[in-house]
Image (cartoon, helix red, strand yellow):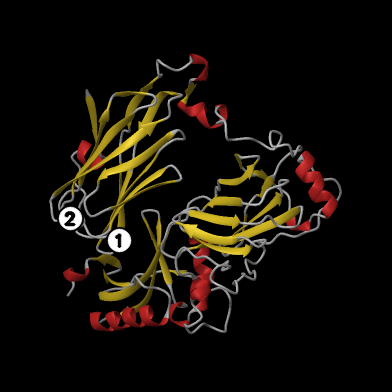
Amino acid sequence: MKIQVFLLACIFAIPVYAQQDTVIFSLDAPENVIAGNEFEVTLTFNKGNLKDYSRFSQELPAGFSAENIVSPNADFTFDEQRIRIIWLKLPADQVIEVKYLISVNERLKGQLKLDGTFAYVVDGERAYLQLDQPIMVEVLPNPSLDPELVVDIAEYPNAIRPANMKNVEDSGQGGYATIVRQKPVIAPNGIATVRLMVKTPPNINFMKLEESIPGGYSFESVESAGATVSQAASLARYVWMKSPEARIFMISYRLVPILEEEQEPVLIRGTLSYNMEGETQNVEPQQVEVHLAGLTAAQKEELMKTGEVSGKVADADMGGTGEMTVETGQTHENQTTVKKTPTKKKAKKYEKSSGSSVVAIQSLETREGVYFRVQVAALRNPYFARTYFADYPLLREVKVEKTAGWNKYTVGSFSSYSDAEAMKERIMRETPVKSAFVVAYKDGRRVAVEDVL
């Protein structure tokens, strides 16, 4: 028997209008599954008049994984326990069906909650639909497994440590940790600085550190301790083919907010992996609230051994200004600057302002009649905007209006659509903003452009 749940727009028969037909989605999955097996999930949606960019995302708890069966025209990925299905252009079919498999760890039991978010663009604005009620799939204990090994889904991350997951005591190092991460420091301009300290395990060569990158941020390596740095999707990777000579060494990087994207909470997960006596060791960083850069050599040893620090720690908060020197390796193999998307740091070719490093952003005032403006950004979190727009003369007169939880930033005020279009083209040519578009107003209220042309 299968259960089916429709999105809010369908359940309450509330159409989602944005000059288009209703968009309707549903998820279909079995009521139960035996641990150690896999089951099929079907995502079905009527796309209405949507044609272009759309995205479905779904989080899975630890112990579950997903793989694609069929996803027409879409890019299907599963990374950091998140399913992402992205369409740059939707198929011609009115009703689209996506199928994927979810695999269940043999030691699990309990209720698996399946929900999801569908995002799409209407008239240049992002819109979201979420499941009103999640699907619940019961995971039944595997009858062939020792009952003492079975754990509840919610307890899996803490209760299970696989055979190849050894902590620092198991590895023979002794002490509190092999790797610690300072609690990320977020500067006023929104840039988050992350610093880690690693105690080199004995008698190893190859070593790898992987860190998750929160959504809405680009990644920039700052200190690599000789590692080769790379990035794949939302994962930053440091690889050492030969362990650093220092017994204890530092790693640091920056997370830079990406304009026009919502920034997820800076909650980072990571794993340090190395081989010892033929077995792979995986160690998760211990997070501490200590300024690692301000520690003396003795304090570093003490922290790694006991988890505590005696004496005064020098004030070495790297996040005060968000300004740091970024390594730029000498060869392709040693390149240590990796960016998820173009960021402010790559905007050197654009004309920047020599004035204030921040701009006072005023609320958009209302006026009578029909006029046009150019929207350059829409942000959930406004802290990044004051410094970003200050860098570019064309954007310094930006105004903000708040609607439905978004801060929408526009520039200019034109009685002619063609003048607004010319400003849009100039902004996209002379600044890093590549998705600007013209918006229309009538007597202070935003309206569809075609309604006033």
Q: Nearer the viewer, residue 362 or 191?
A: 191
Q: Nearer the viewer, residue 421 or 97?
A: 97
Q: Residue at x 67, y 61 (%)?
A: 225
Judge whether residue 23 can be spotted in this image. yes
Judge whether residue 12 can be spotted in this image. no
Q: Residue at x 54, y 55 (%)?
A: 237
Residue 354 position (above or below residue 66)? below
Q: Nearer the viewer, residue 318 or 101?
A: 101
- Give the label on residue 336, or none: none
Quarter in which the N terminus is drawn:
top left
Residue 54 picture quarter: bottom left
Answer yes or no: do the residues labelled 1 and 2 have beta carbons within 8 Å?
Answer: no
The three-letter amino acid code for the residue at tag 1 is Glu
Residue 63 picture quarter: top left
Q: Residue at x 76, y 38 (%)?
A: 175
The earlier-in-sequence mark between 1 and 2 is 2
Q: Residue at x 21, y 51 (%)?
A: 72
Q: How far across and down, in percent of the image, does residue 403 sit? A: 36, 57
- Give the label on residue 91, or none: 2
Q: Is residue 171 left or right of residue 437?
A: right
Separation of residues labelled 1 and 2 (CA atoms): 21 Å
Q: Is residue 11 left or right of residue 156?
A: left
Residue 302 position (above or below residue 450)? above
Q: Which residue is mark 1?
A: 125
The three-letter amino acid code for the residue at tag 2 is Pro
